[in-house]
Image (cartoon, rainbow, N blue to C red):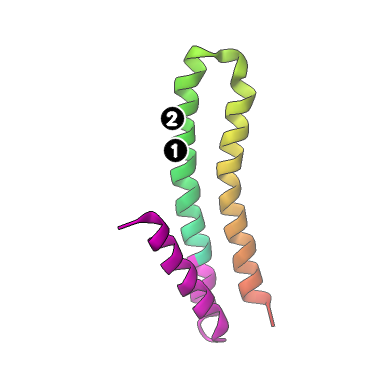
């Protein structure tokens, strides 16, 4: 299945569940869980690529850390979205 289609379905499910007052916990859980899954995949791919590139150009190591931090920030965004879902009126 196409990744964009799967992401669209998950986002639609989170937004739908956030509108019903009883299902907001499920929406918040999906937000954190899918963001954590995406961050894990991103850190895994970026970490493997950074280790490969570190062998060739060790002087560029700060850029590799920046790319890892950008992938890690996805999990924090998911946590913020879950707080918005839980504590919005």
Residue occupying image coordinates x 61% and y 14%:
59
The x, y position of residue 71, in whole percent, is 55, 43
Residue occupying image coordinates x 50% and y 48%:
39
Relative to the observer, which residue lies in front, 31 or 8? 8
User: Badge 1 is on which residue?
Assistant: 44
Residue occupying image coordinates x 59% and y 67%:
82
Please tell me how many numbered marks the rendered image carries: 2
Name the disc covering residue 11, or none.
Answer: none
Q: Residue furthest bottom?
A: 21
Q: Quadrant of the N terminus?
A: bottom left
Question: How many residues crowd mark 2 within 10 Å: few (<14), some (14–19), many (20+)?
Answer: few
- On whether residue 52 falls in the magenta region, the answer is no
Residue occupying image coordinates x 51% and y 56%:
35
The reply to whether dot 2 and dot 1 touch (C-beta < 8 Å) is yes
The x, y position of residue 51, in whole percent, is 47, 23
Q: Is residue 76 above or below residue 13?
A: above
Q: Residue furthest left?
A: 1
For the stretch drawn in magenta, the main secondary structure is helix
Q: Is residue 19 above or below residue 26?
A: below
Mark 2 to mark 1: distance in Å?
6 Å
Magenta-tinted stretch = 1-30
The x, y position of residue 68, in whole percent, is 56, 36
Question: How many residues crowd mark 1 within 10 Å: few (<14), some (14–19), many (20+)?
Answer: some
Question: Is 70 placed left or right of 1 in the picture?
Answer: right
Element type at mark 2: helix
Q: Is residue 1 above or below residue 26?
A: above
The x, y position of residue 22, in whole percent, is 53, 86
User: Badge 2 is on which residue?
Assistant: 48
Question: Is 28 placed left or right of 66 in the picture?
Answer: left
Element type at mark 1: helix
- On whether residue 16 falls in the magenta region, the answer is yes
């Amino acid at each position: 299945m196409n990744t964009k289609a799967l992401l669209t379905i998950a986002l639609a499910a989170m937004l739908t569940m956030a509108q019903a007052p009883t299902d907001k916990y499920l929406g918040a859980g999906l937000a954190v869980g899918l963001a954590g899954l995406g961050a894990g995949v991103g850190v895994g791919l970026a970490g493997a690529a950074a280790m490969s590139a570190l062998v060739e150009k060790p002087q560029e190591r700060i850029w590799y850390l920046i790319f890892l931090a950008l992938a890690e920030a996805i999990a924090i965004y998911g946590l913020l979205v879950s707080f918005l879902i839980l504590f919005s009126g």
